[in-house]
Amino acid sequence: MHSGQLVFSQVIDHLPMHTFRRCVASYQGNRYKKSFSCLDQYLCMAFAQLTYRESLRDIEACLRAQRDKLYHMGIRGNISKSTLADANQNRDWRIYADFAQALIRIARPLYANEDLGLELDNTVYALDASTIDLCLSVFPWALFRSTKSAVKLHTLLDLRGNIPTFIHISDGKLHDVNVLDILLPEPGAFYIMDRGYVDFERLFALHMAGAFFVIRAKSNTKYMRRYSHPTDKSCGVRCDQTIILTGTNTATDYPQPIRRIKFYDDATGKTFNFLTNNFSIPAQTVANLYRYRWQVELFFKWIKQHLRIKSFFGTSENAVKSQIWIAISVYVLVAIIKKRLNIKAELYTILQIMSLTLFEKRPLIQLLSEAESICEDLGVANQLNLFDNFPGQ
C-alpha cells in the first residue's frame, strides 16, 4: 500500500488535514501568503522535530538537498531560512495550538483503556510545570528573574497513555498554582499535584466542581482531627484521618472536612502526608496515585531530551510558542501512529527510526515492526519509557 510513498508522507497521512485547514482559516493564516503556506511551515517544522535539526539554516540545507522529494512530502513552497523565519515570526501560534489540541482529542480515546494498575475507572491527571531557561537579552518578553528569562510549560498529563491534555505556556514569573484558575475541572477525575499547588481556595473550587484531588500537604498545615479510620500499617499507611482545617485563612477557604493520609515509604525511608477530598477509595490507593505523579516529571524530561524545545529557531514570543506547540503535536502524532499500527516499540525507538528513514520508500509499519523485533531480540530497554506504568519512586 505504501511501497511507493516516502516514510515522511506516511507519517503525515495520519494528520487530520481538514482539521488543520479549519485551524488555519480560523486565524486567516494563509491570508496574503501565496508562496509559503501554513502547511509548508508546519511540515518543515515537523521535519525539524523528527530529524533533530539544530537551526533554520540546518532545516534549509537538509530539505534543499532533497529538493526532488519535497513535492511528495507535501511541501509546495520554496524553502529558505528567511521565509521560514518570517513564518515563525508572523503566523499566529494559535493555529498550531488548536491543531495540537485536535490531535490530543484523537489520541486520548486510543489510550483510554490503558491499565494503570489501580482499581479505578476514573480519569487520572498529573499536573505540573517545567521551566525552560532563556537568555534575557535575546528573549526580553519572557520575564523570570532580574538576570535571565524563561518560559514555563504548565501541563496536565492524562496518565493513561501519558497524553498532555492541557498545556499553558507562560513567562517564568507565573506561579504554578495560578494555572488552576484557567483549568476546567472534569467531574469525577483525579488531579494529582505536588505541594506547589497547595491553595485551599482553589482546591475547594475543584471540590465543588465534582473533581477529586490528591496533593502532598505542607508541613505547616494547621488542622484538627475529627475521625481516625482503621489502617493496615504493614502496607505503609500510618494513619487515615478526617480533619478540619484550622488555619487563619484555610478554615474559610476550605470549610468542609478533608482527608489526611500519612504514608511511610520503605524504599526511600520518607514519610508523606497526603490530602484528598475523596473518602471512598482505600488509603493505599491514594498513596499509589501520588506515586504516579512522577510520570509528568518523566514527560518533561523526555520531551526536553528528544524534541527541540530547549533551543529555539526564533526569538519572538510567537516563534517560541509556535515551535513548542508543533513539537507537542509531533509527540502526539507519533503516539497516535504507535497505537494505530499496534507497534510495541517505545516512542524513543520510533522517533530514532523515523529520524533516519524519512526519505525512504518503505512501508512504515514494516520499518517499525522490524525495529520492534530487533529490540526484543536484544532485550533493549530504552530510558524514560513513557508507555509503561512507573513502578514507583
Image (spheres, grey):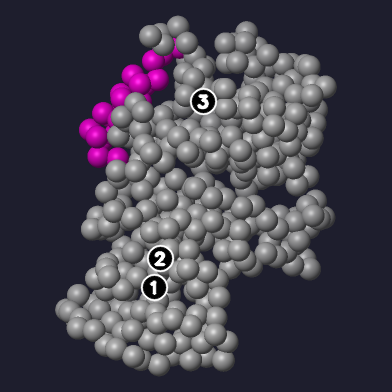
Dot 3 alpha-carbon crowd within 10 angstroms: few under 14, some 14 to 19, many 20 or more: some
Residue 378 coordinates in the image, percent (x, y)? 25, 36
Say which label, 3 or 2, has the lower sequence index: 3
- In the image, residue 146 above or below residue 169: below
| Residue 17 at x, y percent in the picture | 56, 22
* Dot 3 or dot 1, earlier in sequence: 3
SS at mark 2 in the image = strand
- Give, as a single range, the part of the protein colored magenta: 361-382
Quarter of the image for the N terminus: give it: top left
Q: Position of residue 122 (x, y in %)?
A: 33, 55
Q: Earlier in the sequence, mark 1 or mark 2?
A: 2
The part of the image, by quadrant, that contains residue 337 is top left
Residue under circle 3?
15
**Other residues around mark 1 within 10 Å, as few (<14) / some (14–19) / many (≥20):** many
Quadrant showing the C terminus: bottom left
Q: Position of residue 229 (x, y in %)?
A: 24, 84
Q: Secondary structure at mark 3?
A: loop
In the visual, does 382 lie left or right of 28? left
CB within 8 Å, label 1 to label 2:
yes
- For badge 2, the amino acid type reads Phe
Is 259 or 353 nearer to us in this picture? 259
Local crowd size for mark 2, using a 10 Å CA cut-off: few (<14), some (14–19), many (≥20): many
The residue mark sitting in front, 3 or 2, is: 2
> Is residue 372 inside the magenta stretch?
yes
Secondary element at image label 1: loop
Which residue was labeled with disc 1? 277
Q: Which image quadrant for residue 391?
A: bottom left
Say which residue label 2 marks: 212
Between the C-alphas of marks 3 and 2, the distance is: 34 Å
| Kind of residue at disc 3 | Leu
- Residue 326 visible? The answer is no
